[in-house]
Image (spheres, rainbow, N blue to C red):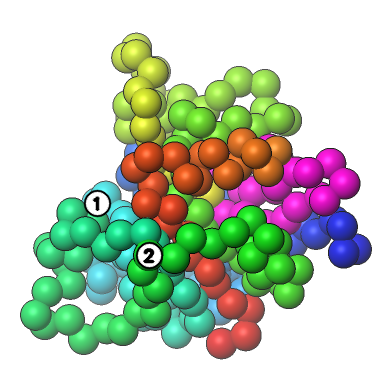
Amino acid sequence: MTDDVVLLAVPVIRQEYHWDCGLACSKMVLKYLQSIDDDQFQRACWELKLTESVWTIDLAYLMNHIGVRHCFYTQTLGVDKGLKTRYNKNNKYFVTVKKGISVSVQEIQTHLQEGHVAIVLVNAVVLCCELCSSPVKYCCFLPVGQKCFCRKPEYQGHFVVVCGFNRTTDSIYYNNPAYSDRVCSTSVGNFEEARRSYGTDEDILFIYKDH
Ligand SMILES: [Zn+2]
């Protein structure tokens, strides 16, 4: 690792269902931090009732539940983001949320340079890996292995873990939970377009190595 190239050893874990890319990303991050085993992870998900569509705020609650230092940046926190149903009056959890803040790619790079990682909400339709030959087929939220026959949608929310960058080639490295065997790479331009795409609210969850 130099100042120009950072690639953190974040394990790649494949998602199991069509809805749990966020949980797979959380698992990758927690394995990287060595802060939890699989049983504890399952229990935490069960305790927070993360058994269906998972939003970025859920991942922040999960990190909080497990005791991992984090900061959730978002442009908006609407009632449609899982808040209304899951975290109402009886809310006994705290998460660190910074609303209306746009995180720059430089800030992400500095974060990575310190050994920390981030889970980013992207538009999977826009995000395009330069190493993978074919785009990921997740366009209709089908379970893994099922074929898709629908038209390409304009927005497909998907979580990835940002784990490095190369300033010389202007690349961003990330783990895509659609795969289990590779680290993906894209240009800073494509990464920026995918995470700032309409629909993401620029959600990004910074996670810190030190608790
Ligand atoms: Zn790839």
Residue 139 x %, y %: 38, 26
Judge the density around disc 2: few (<14), some (14-19), many (≥20) Cα neighbours within 10 Å: few
Classify 153 as above or below 169: above
Would you say residue 151 sits in the magenta stretch? no
Q: Residue 52 carries which label?
A: 1
What residue is disc 2 on? 100
Q: In which quarter of the image is residue 75?
A: bottom left
**Which residue occupies the foreground of this view, 201 or 115?**
201
Judge the density around disc 1: few (<14), some (14-19), many (≥20) Cα neighbours within 10 Å: few
Please tell me which residue is depicted at 35% across the width and 79% down the height of the picture: 95
Per the image, label 2 sits on a secondary structure element best described as loop
Residue 205 shown left or right of residue 51 in the figure = right
Residue 153 shown left or right of residue 87 in the figure = right
User: Closer to the N terminus: mark 2 or mark 1?
Assistant: 1
Whole-angstrom CA distance, mark 2 to mark 1, is 27 Å
Residue 80 x %, y %: 18, 54
Per the image, label 1 sits on a secondary structure element best described as loop
Classify 195 as above or below 31: above
Q: Which amino acid is tagged 1? A: Glu
Q: Which amino acid is tagged 2? A: Gly
Please tell me which residue is depicted at 56% across the width and 87% down the height of the picture: 211
Which residues, given as a range, are shown in magenta? 161-186
Residue 24 x %, y %: 47, 54
Please tell me which residue is depicted at 70% across the width and 47% down the height of the picture: 172
Comparing labels 2 and 1, the label whose residue is closer to the camera? 2
